[in-house]
Image (cartoon, rainbow, N blue to C red):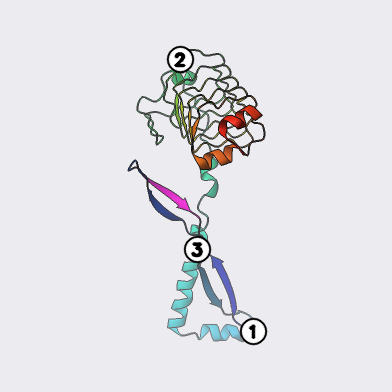
Amino acid sequence: MAATSSIPLNQNVFRLRFKPSKRHALLPVESYSSPRVFCSEVSRDGPELKENNNMSPTKQLKNVACGVLAVWAVTTASPVVAASQRLPPLSTEPNRCERAFVGNTIGQANGVYDKPLDLRFCDYSNEKSNLKGKSLAAALMSDAKFDGADMTEVVMSKAYAVGASFKGVDFSNAVIDRVNFGKADLQGALFKNTVLSGSTFDDAKLEDAVFEDTIIGYVDLQKLCTNKTISPDGRAELGCR
């Protein structure tokens, strides 16, 4: 008896979105119904083995083709789903923490940088002069300490700051674009006239954070307002309902 097996194929579909700034972003879109490969396999038990041996060359070729297609389906399905969550090994560059005081000399809003900035586990507590106005595009900041630092007018684009500490940091007039602040400590941080675009604050601590004249999109605002640690004054400043 013929047994039928189905192998789902996950497709990576991309959509080209056009923005007013004429920058084109290639964004992943969720897959729709996955196509399936159906193969019929003749049982090798009993007299059906003889039938398989007498199979016509055309049918044998079809089975080979189906097998190749099935292998392709398995090897191409779910291509490195977790790759975006993997971080490179900690940099062994001497004085890597001091590179934050220089920043990315060609850093732009799209996260372009001239040299990677690995600031993980660095301590910039109470740094009052060397971080102001720096471009920290695509910086790795997880588990770093910036408590009490002056980061006014800093440009943080596509930075990864999961688990970092920014208690009492002054982000006034800064551009914070697509930064991951997951589980970061932002208690008492000052976001005065700060651009907060596309950034995430999942499980971040935002007690006593100030959001005076913060520039933020509607969708980003709705996500930020779900954070229950924001004080009533902060929620009022943001316009959370």
Task: Identify residue for label 3.
Answer: 73
To which quarter of the image does residue 42 belong?
bottom right
Please identify the quadrant where the N terminus is shown: bottom right
Q: Dot 3 lies on which element?
A: helix
To which quarter of the image does residue 229 belong?
top right
Q: Earlier in the sequence, mark 2 or mark 1?
A: 1
**Which amino acid, by three-letter code, is at mark 3?**
Ala
Where residue 67 appears, as percent x and y from the top left, is: 50, 70
Q: Earlier in the sequence, mark 1 or mark 3?
A: 1
In reply to whether residue 4 is colored magenta, the answer given is no
The residues colored magenta run: 23-34
In reply to whether residue 33 is colored magenta, the answer given is yes
Q: Mark 3, residues whose alpha carbon is within 10 Å: few (<14), some, or many (≥20)?
A: some
Check whether the beta carbons of the residues at disc 2 and disc 1 lie within 8 A of each other. no
Q: Is residue 180 above or below residue 210?
A: below
Judged by depth in the image, the label closer to the viewer, 1 or 3, is 3
Where residue 69 appears, as percent x and y from the top left, is: 47, 68
| Residue at x 35% of width, y 28% of height | 106
Where residue 63 appears, as percent x and y from the top left, is: 48, 76
Q: Dot 1 lies on which element?
A: loop
Q: Is residue 221 visible?
A: yes
Task: Tell me the tag on residue 46.
Answer: 1
Give whichever of 105, 168 is nearer the camera: 168
Q: Is residue 35 above or below residue 238?
A: below
Task: Tell me the tag on residue 130.
Answer: 2
